Amino acid sequence: MMRVSALVLGLAAVMPAAAQAQRPQWAPVLRGYFLNVPIASAAGPFSDAVAADVQRLRLMARSSYGPLSVDVAYEHVLTLRSEATVGLFAGLSPTGTGGDWLPLQGSLLQKDHIDWQHRVDRASLAYGVGSAEATIGRQPISWATTLFLTPADPFVPFDPSDPFREYRRGVDAVRLRGFPGAFSEIDLAFRVANTPIGRTVSAAGRGRAAVGAWEFLGWAGVVHDDPAVSVAATLSIGGAVLRTESVVRRANDETVFRATIGADRSFVVWDRNVYVVLEYQRDGFGAASGDDLIATLLSEPARRGELQVFGRDEVVVQGSLELHPLVNVSALVIWNVNDPSALLGPAASYSAADEVAVRGGVYFGAGRGTTASGLLGSEFGAVPTTAYASVTWFF
């Protein structure tokens, strides 16, 4: 296995050099990304203390010839761990719940302390003519308006606590995009997903238009076989951006309302750049109290990977401060108002070079860990203290 890893890294190291030479128009542009994350978690109510090391290698290629273009990305994730599970950072796994329909992923080796997975994360063919483009295959699609909590995005959402969000997960879809004007867009998407509870279809059309400082967005269609309609808007005012998105969905003979409102702003304090994000989400799919949490975790939206958080009312606050052009510190708080419980995540990052970034942080869970009967007491109360460090290399 070590010889295979060395060969892959060797190929990754030489491919960019080949790509920089004189090449024909159709020759692919090759890039790569390597991430190494040592992790240490204390014991929690439902887990033992664990040490782990996660290595993620991503190779990317893009080629075009006239109106045709091909986009491909291939990932390997190797996890070495002292116990059976790692806990946080499940988003590092390329084969988690995502609804993949094409058989382009799998496990290469899986034992008690080793997990080696791979996945083709991009495999799409696009044809563009004039102001329109059609794309088929595995591709990233995001219809989110807010930054952390995105209930109106019908595709695979990010985990809001995940610090490694360099690439959005690709989904298997057919997509048609048109640009009637400089500040408007029409987007149609059709997706088949194989979820843990069966195959579903999502198909919707979205429109976007900018008017002055406003941007208005809306879509309608079906999401995992459920009819749904969404409206969203952003407003740039006084150096801040106000964002809101909402969706009404008919699921299991019930009408469910989901919405997020938030604001973000950059400003300067004592000659240092500061960035702050605040978001609040009201989610009809979420648990109204800690007593409803297990039912929510077992619900169809949660098992399909649609829920980023599990409370009915959740708040996210993130602030970052630039101590130096190369050094940044930040803090993240995700607060479940209904439990109540919270996840706290201070972190720091250092830009070691143009292509290398170093990052580290700690996560703390606050709230009731277990109930009197030994069940999960709150969303974040049982999260064990977890520390991580990472090195990211783009090549």
Image: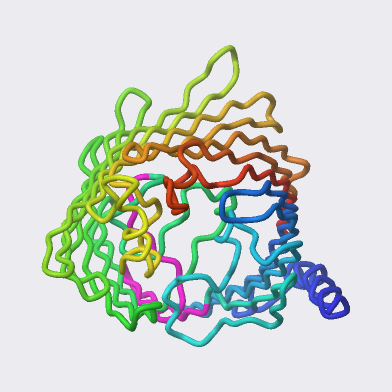
- Name the side, left or right, on which 326 lies relative to 14: left
Residue 186 placement (x, y as % from top left): 24, 63
> In percent of the image, x 35 and y 77: which residue is there?
134
- State the image coordinates of residue 243 (x, y, percent, origin top left): 30, 39
Q: Quadrant of the N terminus?
A: bottom right
- Considering every residue shown, the one lying at the far front of the view is 373
Magenta range is: 123-146
Residue 53 shown left or right of residue 7 in the figure? left
Q: Can residue 209 be seen in this snapshot?
A: no
Q: Quadrant of residue 321?
A: top right
Q: Residue 380: horizontal and vertical position, in percent? A: 47, 44
268 or 96: nearer the eye? 96
Query: Residue 162, relative to residue 6: is it above or below?
Result: above
Q: Residue at x 65, y 59 (%)?
A: 86
Let me know if residue 138 appears in the view.
Answer: yes
- The residue furthest bottom is 103
